[in-house]
C-alpha cells in the first residue's frame, strides 16, 4: 500500500490577495515553503528555528531574517524564537477538517507544537473556528483545547515578536551591520532591552556610530563573531571614561583605542583558555 503524504490546500485566489501581492518575491517563496513544509501539522503550526529554516533554503541567516520579517510584519506568520514555535494563523481557513475524526486528531497535532503564548492563541483560534462547524465536529474537539495552559498570556499582541523598533531598527538599517553580522533579530531585541536597563543614560545611536567607526578604522573589524557580543563589550566602561559611568565620552587620542584593543585581546585570550580546559 502506497503511503499518502500529508498535503496543504492552497487556493488559487492567493495570487489576487492584496497582502500576498505586497510581499517581495523571496517572501512569497518562503510563504509557500512554510505552507508546504514537511513538519507542518494539520493545525498549521510546527517546531522550527530560523537557523534551521535558513539552512533548508540554503540562505544565510541574515538573508532569511530579512525575508521572514516580511511575513511577521504582515501577520501571516507568528513566531516565538524562545519556544522555537512557528504558526500560520490562517491555515485552518484554507484547510478545514474533512471529518470529526480529523478534529479528534488535533490533540496529537497540538502535542507537536511547543508550549508558548502563540500556541495558546492558536488554541483560542481553534475554539472559535469550530463554533462555525456542524455539531458532530464541535463535539469531537478534544478537551485540551478548552484547558488554560500553565503559561500565562500577558498579551495577545503576538505580532510584536521579532518586530524591530527604535534602536533595534537603527541597527538593522546600518550597512556595516548588514554586511558583517548574522545575528537573529530576536537576540538583538533581547540584548538591546538588557543594555537599556544596564546603561540607562546612554545614547546608543552615538555609541553605535563610535563602534562602527572604530571597526572600520581597524580595517579588519572587531574580533567577535556576533554583533550582540561585540557591541555589548563595547558598551562596557573604557579606561578613558569617568568613574561615574559616562558612556557618551569619545576618546580623543589613539591611546584609548590601543587600550580597548588590549582589553579585547585579553578577554579573547581568557575565553580561549576556558574553552580549551
Image (cartoon, rainbow, N blue to C red):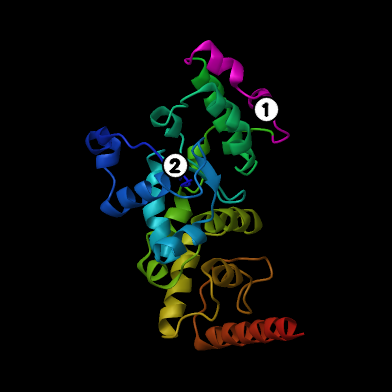
Disc 2 element: loop
Q: Which residues are magenta?
A: 132-151
Is 100 located above or below residue 14 in the figure?
A: above
Is 124 located above or below residue 25 in the figure?
A: above
The residue sitting at the left extreme is: 16
Q: Which residue is mark 2?
A: 77
Image point (49%, 80%), residue name: 252
Viewer can see residue 17: no
- Residue 139 in the magenta stretch? The answer is yes
User: What number is the disc on residue 144?
Assistant: 1
Image point (42%, 31%), residue name: 95
Question: Could you tell which of marks 1 and 2 lies nearer the N-terminus?
Answer: 2
Q: Is residue 28 left or right of residue 221?
A: left
Is 247 located above or below residue 189 in the figure?
A: below
Viewer can see residue 77: yes
- Residue 277 in the magenta stretch? The answer is no
- The residue closer to the viewer here, 167 or 151, is 151
Q: Residues within 10 Å of mark 1 (few under 14, many from 20)?
A: few
Image point (67%, 27%), residue name: 144
Disc 1 element: helix
Amino acid at each position: 500500500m502506497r503511503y499518502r503524504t500529508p498535503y496543504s490546500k492552497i487556493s488559487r485566489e492567493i495570487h489576487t490577495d492584496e497582502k500576498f501581492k505586497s510581499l517581495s518575491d523571496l517572501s512569497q517563496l518562503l510563504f509557500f515553503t512554510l505552507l508546504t513544509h514537511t513538519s507542518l501539522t494539520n493545525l498549521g503550526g510546527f517546531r522550527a528555528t530560523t537557523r534551521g529554516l535558513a539552512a533548508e533554503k540554503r540562505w544565510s541567516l541574515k538573508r532569511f531574517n530579512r525575508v521572514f520579517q516580511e511575513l511577521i510584519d504582515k501577520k501571516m506568520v507568528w513566531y516565538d524564537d524562545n519556544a522555537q514555535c512557528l504558526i500560520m494563523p490562517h491555515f485552518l481557513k484554507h484547510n478545514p477538517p474533512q471529518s470529526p475524526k480529523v478534529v479528534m486528531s488535533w490533540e496529537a497535532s497540538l502535542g507537536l507544537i511547543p508550549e508558548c503564548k502563540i500556541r495558546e492563541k492558536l488554541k483560542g483560534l481553534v475554539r472559535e473556528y469550530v463554533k462555525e462547524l456542524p455539531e458532530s465536529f464541535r463535539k469531537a474537539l478534544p478537551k485540551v483545547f478548552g484547558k488554560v495552559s500553565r503559561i500565562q498570556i500577558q498579551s495577545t499582541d503576538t505580532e510584536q515578536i521579532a518586530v524591530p523598533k527604535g534602536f533595534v531598527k537603527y541597527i538593522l538599517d546600518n550597512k556595516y551591520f548588514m554586511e558583517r553580522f548574522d545575528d537573529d533579530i530576536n537576540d538583538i531585541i533581547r540584548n538591546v532591552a538588557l543594555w537599556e536597563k544596564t546603561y540607562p543614560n546612554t545614547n546608543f545611536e552615538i555609541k553605535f556610530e563610535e563602534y562602527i567607526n572604530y571597526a572600520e578604522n581597524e580595517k579588519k573589524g572587531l574580533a567577535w563573531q556576533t554583533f550582540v557580543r561585540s557591541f555589548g563589550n563595547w558598551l562596557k566602561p573604557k579606561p578613558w571614561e569617568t568613574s561615574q559611568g559616562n558612556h557618551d565620552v569619545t576618546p580623543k587620542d589613539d591611546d584609548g583605542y590601543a587600550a580597548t584593543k588590549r582589553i579585547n585581546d585579553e578577554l579573547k585570550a581568557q575565553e580561549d583558555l576556558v574553552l580549551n580546559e
